[in-house]
Image (spheres, rainbow, N blue to C red):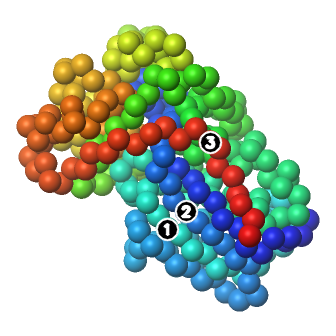
Amino acid sequence: MRIQNTTVSVQVPATSANLGPGFDALGLALDLCDVLSVEATTGAVEIEVEGEGSGDLPDGEDHLVVRALRRGLDYAGAPQTGLRLRAHNRIPHGRGLGSSAAATVAGLLLARGMISDPEALDDDAVLQLATEFEGHPDNAAPALRGGVVLSWMEGERAHAVPLAHAERALRPVVLLPGATLSTHQARGLLPEQVPHADAVHNASRAALLVHALASAPELLLQATEDRLHQEQRAPGMPESVELMRVLRQEGHAAVISGAGPSVLVLSGRRGDLAPLVRRFVADPRSWRIAEVPLREVPSTPVVG
């Protein structure tokens, strides 16, 4: 395997995982993308970051995109090289919108674009490698494939399938707080065991959610009921969970986006949600509300 293309770019979207009851299994891609380009060089690693994370992210080999790119080259049997990476980051960090999954998928896809045989890093390989970085595929799968994706693990092997026609049910709105919460901290709030009745409840709602997304959007509110992780994480993001409760009481299919603290309304309008945010959060100016369409196209590297 050789480096064939010295300049490659890619756009990778934000994602929202879980969607309520689909814990570590369901996710969707949002049309809010990081744009990255890489140039192979004979020198050391050079990184330029604009937007989210500028000034805070590592500027060398520890940068997540660089680590993923190098893992992809190793996997394909390609030589390593100097890198000049440019990133225009639009995905907020630490808000439950899959910024780390986007960076990982971006690095792997940049590696695909560089090598002489892209099939050596096909989608299955990228999903598997991204899952090794992330620990689970629920963000990586939609970041790679776009749309709404159901993913699961079989042993250590990651799998994913798209949900057909789900875009018909969705009009996503993201409610973004000023506060951040690390995925590690959010996961630390979860209990090791759950009551059997709660597990049964979530299994039924996750199954209903697949149906609602595919063909019955009128069932989205009932289908997004969760007992396994959102309320349990309230101590780490009390305002987000309370806002989610209020929105649901008002009939909106609201969920915590990924590990939080952002709130996702699966089908709504900014004008309907903004008054509720103003009424029920302490500082409405610290929250941003945006209608962000579903991104349905897969992420693909572009050479040149």
Residue 116 in percent (x, y) is at 88, 63
Q: Count every numbered label the image shows and give the total.
A: 3
Quarter of the image for the N terminus: give it: bottom right
Which secondary structure lies at badge 1?
strand
Q: CA distance from mark 1 to mark 3?
A: 20 Å
Please rate how many residues cluster around mark 1, counting C-alpha atoms within 10 Å: few if below 14, some from 14 to 19, many from 20. Answer: some
Please rate how many residues cluster around mark 2, counting C-alpha atoms within 10 Å: few if below 14, some from 14 to 19, many from 20. Answer: some
Determine the residue located farthest toward the bottom in the rendered image: 43
Q: Quadrant of residue 157?
A: top right
Which secondary structure lies at badge 2?
strand
* Residue at the disc numbered 1: 88
Q: What label does residue 35 carry, if any?
A: 2
Q: Amino acid at mark 1?
A: His
Q: Nearest the camera: 167 or 178?
A: 167
Q: What label does residue 297 carry, if any?
A: 3
**On screen, residue 47 above or below 271:** below
Q: Amino acid at mark 3?
A: Val
Q: Are marks 3 and 2 in contact (CB under 8 Å)?
A: no
Using residue 76 as the reference point, say whether residue 106 is left or right of it.
left
Residue name at image x 42 percent, y 16 percent: 217
Q: CA distance from mark 3 to mark 2?
A: 15 Å
